[in-house]
Image (tube, rainbow, N blue to C red):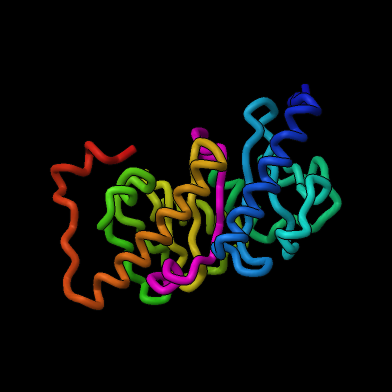
Amino acid sequence: MEPISTVANTLALKQELVEGAALVASIGLVPLTQGNLSLRDPESGYILMTPHDYAYDQMTIDDVLVQDLAGNVIEGFREPSHESPVHLAVYEKRPEVLGIVHAEPIYTNLFGVLHKAIAPLHVNTLIDVGGEVPVMPFAPSGSRQFGYDMLEVMGDRRAVVWANHGMLAVGDSLRKAIHCTVMVEISAQLYHMALQHGEPHLIPPEYHDRLVG
């Protein structure tokens, strides 16, 4: 039997995705048409995703694609994101994930080109990410295998930097994934600025377990 989701629920999820994409674009996390966002419909298990190379300020619910976990397009006429296989790999392997953001923030990309993990200097890095933000070695990002390899680097964290190519954050909702993305970029900015003045002081390890959210 085909998975079932009510029309009203699907429309609400599409609107949530469009509004989330507009938000991350408005605060500079996805310049121009870069990046992609998705969420999982908990009723049907289908994945709703932003299309490939399409302006976020023009996007409507009609532009959202619906795919199954195998990558088949169930609904939508736009070209699927070239990184949809990465999202699908995450949803396959991490059933608790209901929202994903792949973004291209400047300071996070700075650490990506340095291949340097973003240290958990701020409490929100621990709360939202679960620890330092690791960096995945550079590889072309358009395959499911890339997603599997990324998850190995990511471990139990909720964010990972792609070397020379942005970052990916997950959450148990799209809102949480967006919040995590913002906190990673704030942490990257803070870490960069702190390094200009000396060696930053890390949060003592004995407090980490209390802060991880």
Magenta region, residue range: 92-112
Place of residue 55 in the rendered image (x, y in percent of width and height, measured from the top left): 74, 63
Instruction: Residue at 28%, 48% (x, y): give it.
Output: 123
Place of residue 122 in the rendered image (x, y in percent of width and height, measured from the top left): 28, 54
Measured along the vertical axis of the image, is residue 180 above or below residue 44?
Answer: below
Instruction: Residue at 62%, 51% (x, y): give it.
Output: 37
In the displayed structure, does residue 30 sit left or right of residue 183? right
Residue 93 lies in the magenta-colored region: yes
Res 130 quadrant in image: top left
Outermost residue toward the top?
1
Quadrant holding the N terminus: top right
| 42, 30: nearer the viewer | 30
Residue 126 lies in the magenta-colored region: no
In the displayed structure, does residue 138 sit left or right of residue 31? left
In the displayed structure, does residue 16 sit left or right of residue 108? right
Instruction: Residue at 18%, 52% (x, y): give it.
Output: 203
In the displayed structure, does residue 58 sit left or right of residue 90? right
Measured along the vertical axis of the image, is residue 117 above or below residue 78?
Answer: below
Place of residue 104 in the rendered image (x, y in percent of width and height, measured from the top left): 53, 66
Measured along the vertical axis of the image, is residue 109 above or below residue 212?
Answer: below
Place of residue 103 in the rendered image (x, y in percent of width and height, measured from the top left): 55, 60
Instruction: Residue at 56%, 52% (x, y): give it.
Output: 101
